[in-house]
Image (spheres, rainbow, N blue to C red):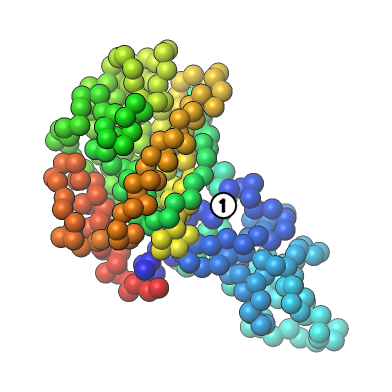
Amino acid sequence: MVATSLRNFWHPIGTAAEITEQPKPFTLLGERIVAFRDAGGPAAFKDLCIHRGAALSGGSIKDGRLTCPYHGWAYDRSGACVHIPSLPPGAPIPAKARAIAYAVREAYDLVWVALDEPAQPFPAWPEDAWNRADRRVFMVNQYLWKTSAGRVVENAMDFSHFNFVHIGYTELADGPVVKPYEVARTEGGLQYAYEDGRLRRDYTIDFPFIVHDRKSVVVVGNGGTWSEGADTKAGDVTHLTFIASPVDATTTKIYVFVGRNHSLDKPDSEFAAGFDIVMDQDRVVVETQRPEQIPIDIKEELHLRFPDAPAILYRRMMRELDSAEAFVP
């Protein structure tokens, strides 16, 4: 089950490189989408010809128009049908002959879609890192997990599992005991910070499915997490971003980015090494969680005050979203 109001948020359907001049199928919140690119940028429609329900993704772009493979109906980027081959020249095209067009934007090397209007505010990237010469941001990889986007987000914002799931990669320096800290609700989601004696982790959750983890070096020590190196110094910031796109209720595509304010002359590969391993360590566990959708009733799972504080607030926010809109298949 997915909340209908999730349709008003912006979600990525694919990378910018995946949206090409010919139509391709994508799925978001269980909805089949066809996307293509023309001189005006990316466009996205419901993958359905209004005539006889054929998948427009099976068609092609001809003369700048998306053409249905069944009867050749052609749609411009606004969704309006501009040509029906079976009608004589000059015959009027019915006003209802339109594809269902979605709001679409290209940003952060991704193409984003909002299925319903009015769309929520478009997510901003922390510190405007994409447009700063003293920052470097790159996409590490994309992953497909058999679980809900909510479970993915809760995993990404949880640090109490580091000393068990990610031994040798991301352990808290002062051990598994979680010290008191505060979680605050913001206009766009929630924020909190945690220090383990060596790193300060500042988390920003852009509700509902984006997690930014800003790791700043406070004290240089031996060893370290996978994203640190031998030349790590106090003040170095490594920014991890997880964007969970809900393909359907139990399938999620995850786009992972790394940003940094240091070592700008080094290849990105040095900061991506090990990430596939860490993500797979999480996947193995998260895909076993039941139910796949996070229970939004706080009483349905046992919570600990500080280790689970972000998840408790996140679930309350999801419950508020649920109360605003009925749940549908």
Farthest residue in the right direction? 89
Q: Which of the two residues, 164 or 177, is positioned nearer the viewer here?
A: 164
**Picture quarter containing residue 292?**
bottom left
Estimate the x, y position of residue 173 in percent, counting from the top left.
Answer: 25, 24
Give amino acid for label 1. Gly
Q: Residue at x 27, y 35 (%)?
A: 164
Inspect this view and state whether residue 249 appears: yes
Q: Is residue 176 above or below residue 121?
A: above
Q: Nearer the viewer, residue 46 or 292?
A: 292
**Vertical placement of 270 versus 328: above or below?**
above
Q: Secondary structure at mark 1?
A: strand
Whole-percent x and y of residue 238? Answer: 41, 28
- Number of labels in the image equals 1
| Residue 58 drawn above or below residue 144 | below
Query: Going by the image, does 77 lie left or right of 110?
Result: right
Q: Residue at x 38, y 57 (%)?
A: 148
Measured as percent of width and height from the top left, residue 2 is found at 38, 66
What residue did someone put label 1 on? Answer: 14
**For residue 127, above or below residue 300:** above
Indicate the quadrant containing the N terminus: top left, top right, bottom left or bottom right: bottom left
Query: Quarter of the image containing the C terminus?
Result: bottom left
Residue 101 visible here: no
**Location of residue 58 (image quadrant):** bottom right
